[in-house]
Image: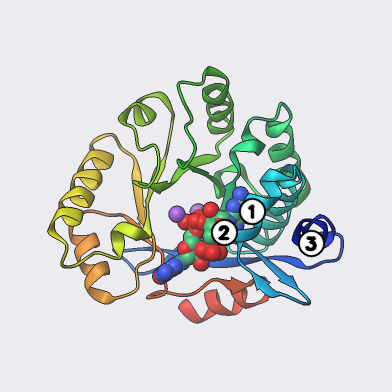
Amino acid sequence: RAMEKDLRQALARGEITLHFQPIVDLATGRTICFEALARWYEPSRGLVPPSEFIPIAEEIGIIVEFGNWFLRRACREAARWPADIRIAVNLSPLQLSRADFIQQVEAALAESGLPPERLELEITESVPLVANQAMREVLCALKSRGISIALDDFGTGYSSLSYLRSFPFDRLKIDHSFVREIPGHGQTMAIVKAVLDLARSVNVRTTAEGIEIEPQRIWLQAQGCSEGQGYLFNRPMPAEKVAEFLAGEC
Ligand code: G
Ligand code: G
Ligand code: MN
Ligand code: NA
């Protein structure tokens, strides 16, 4: 495929950038974190969404190179932000399974000077993490360094209670496909409420994704969801907009 060839050269050509979307404390309305989201501006195709090019990068074996670049770029950017603002970086499961993954994370922190407490890594549950002892050791090693771990896309994939028991997650991200059905869809709301109760009872924080309207924010906050993300608050923005955005919040 032509797109594969172009994707292999996209990093070197400077066509890949990161955008940053605010994650907001639902109680105070303040931004506490930004999620880094990859963007590919390909000259002839225009903007190719990550939902299209990340799976191709995984398939053709360049996701580890891309992922390490995202991690370094995100840490470098976040190091310039106020010290109470954190950065969340999406990981491909293929990055996590690499023997040198922890060294890559340490290198990104060391070269940027970002404290590990300001880095959160998002792991998608759309692939089975199984009862994988090696994976558990990697996550525990990251946590012991002060890095937090979020389970992304919760509710859409292999949502398993055993994950919550076996892995040291700090946060669940409730997928926007659930948030979209609030308010109105009783069954979905009952499930989300149960997930929020469960997370609270095991001391796991929660972020609802894809909040677009005020009634969603109000209901989620009332049910004890700690943070939110979505167009209601802000769209992902380029790096150079972040400082200005934070200044406007004070
Ligand atoms: O930017 P957008 O909202 O379209 O992102 C869609 C999905 O693409 C995200 O939920 C995430 O799973 C994936 N994605 C975006 N940026 C990255 C990234 O830097 N690394 C990985 N592995 N996936 C990403
Ligand atoms: O990591 P994850 O796959 O969850 O990435 C979040 C995705 O959701 C990104 O592609 C981001 O652009 C998208 N997104 C963020 N806020 C909203 C929103 O309010 N509505 C919708 N439909 N998508 C959103
Ligand atoms: Mn994510
Ligand atoms: Na998600």
- Is the CB of the residue bearing disc 2 within 8 angstroms of ligand 1? yes
Image position of 227 (left or right of 17): left
Give 218 or 93, whichever is nearer the viewer: 93
Helix, strand or loop at label 2? It is helix
Badge 2 amino acid: Ser
Question: Which residue is at a point 53% across and 26% down the rendered structure image?
Answer: 140
- Which numbered circle lies on residue 2? 3
Question: Which residue is at a point 81% across and 59% down the rendered structure image?
Answer: 11
Image position of 211 (left or right of 50): left
Badge 1 amino acid: Ile
CA distance separating discs 1 and 2: 6 Å
Q: Give the vertical position of 28 relative to 227 (above or below).
A: below
The answer to whether mark 1 and mark 2 are in CB contact below 8 A is yes
Question: Which residue is at a point 43% across and 30% down the rendered structure image?
Answer: 168
The location of residue 217, given as percent across then percent down, is: 27, 68
- Is the CB of the residue bearing disc 1 within 8 angstroms of ligand 1? yes
Q: Quadrant of the N terminus?
A: bottom right
